[in-house]
Image: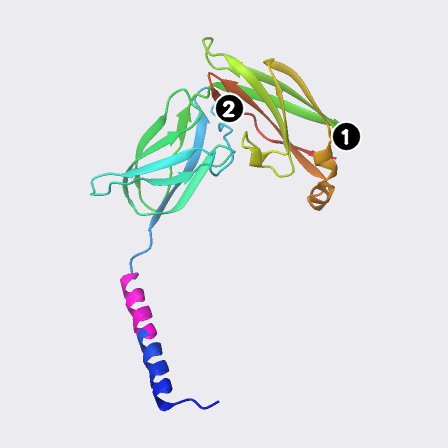
Amino acid sequence: MIVSINMKKSAIWLLAIIASTLVGCNELDNYDAPNGGIYGKILDATTNEPIPLPVQGSTGVIINLFEQNTTATKSIDFYAKDDGTYANTQVFNGDYKVVVNGPFIETAERTVSINGQTELNFTATPYARIDISASASGKTVTVQYSVNPTNPGLSVTDVYGYWNFAPGIDNSGSNYAEKVTVHENSGEITFDLENSTTFQSNLYKIADNGNKVYFRVGAKTNGIINYSKIVEIAL
C-alpha cells in the first residue's frame, strides 16, 4: 500500500496534538493527594457493641462528612459496613461535622479534626436488638431468634429470616437467596434447604465456598428494619 507524504504529515500532526493534550491533562491533575482518613465503629449506646447494619451499598447506612470553615458546599458520602464499622482512607485533613443516618432512634452526629488516619466512634440506639443462634441437622437449619425493642412504645410488626450464599445479607432482594416472614418477637425459623429449589440449583456456588451458608434475622420496628449479626453454617 502506498502512503502519501501528506498522510504521513497528518498522522504526525495528530500524534503531536494527542501528546500535548495528555501533558496538559497531567499538569491540570497534578493536585496533592488526600493526606488523612477517618475510621471507627457505630456502637450501641447501651451495650457498647457495634450495631449490625445493612449491606454496604445502595441500601446501606451512609456516612456524611461536611467540611467546616471552608467554601465546600457538598458532603463527602460513603457507606458503613454491615458489621457496624466504617472507614474512608482518602480524606483531606481538616475539621468536619460527621453525620450517620441509619436505623437509629436518633441520627448520630459528631465533629472531628482529621489529622492523618483518625479514629472516630459513634453511639446510637437501634429500634430493636436481635439475638440469634443457628444449628444444622443435615441440610435443615434452625435459627433461634429474639427481638427486643429498645423502648416499650416501639412496635415490631414483621420479623424476617434470611439465608444467602454470601455473608452480605439484608432486606434487599439482591442480598438474600430466600426470605421467610413471621410475626412473633421470639421463636424459631426453619430452612429446609434439602427441598429448596434455590439451594439445589446453586449447589456449585455453595461447594465453591466450602459448603458455607449464611443466615440473618431482621425485624421491622416502627417501619425501620434492624438486623442481627450474620451466622455462618457449614453444611
User: Which residues are the magenta region?
Assistant: 18-29
How would you classify the magenta stretch by its main secondary structure?
helix
Question: Badge 1, how many Cα within 10 Å: few under 14, some, many 20+?
Answer: few
What residue lies at 38% left-to-right and 31% top-to-bottom?
100
What residue lies at 24% left-to-right and 38% top-to-bottom?
68
Q: Amino acid at mark 1?
A: Asn
Query: Which residue is label 1 attached to?
Result: 195
Query: Which residue is label 2 attached to?
Result: 226
What residue lies at 71% left-to-right and 35% top-to-bottom?
199
The x and y percentages for residue 98 are 33, 34
| Left or right of 197 on screen, residue 68 | left
Quadrant (top left, top right, bottom left, bottom right) of the C terminus: top right
Mark closer to the chain start, 2 or 1 = 1
> Residue 123 versus residue 13: which sits nearer the camera?
13
Q: Amino acid at mark 2?
A: Asn
Which residue is outermost to the right? 138
Mark 2–mark 1 distance (CA, rounded to whole Å):
29 Å
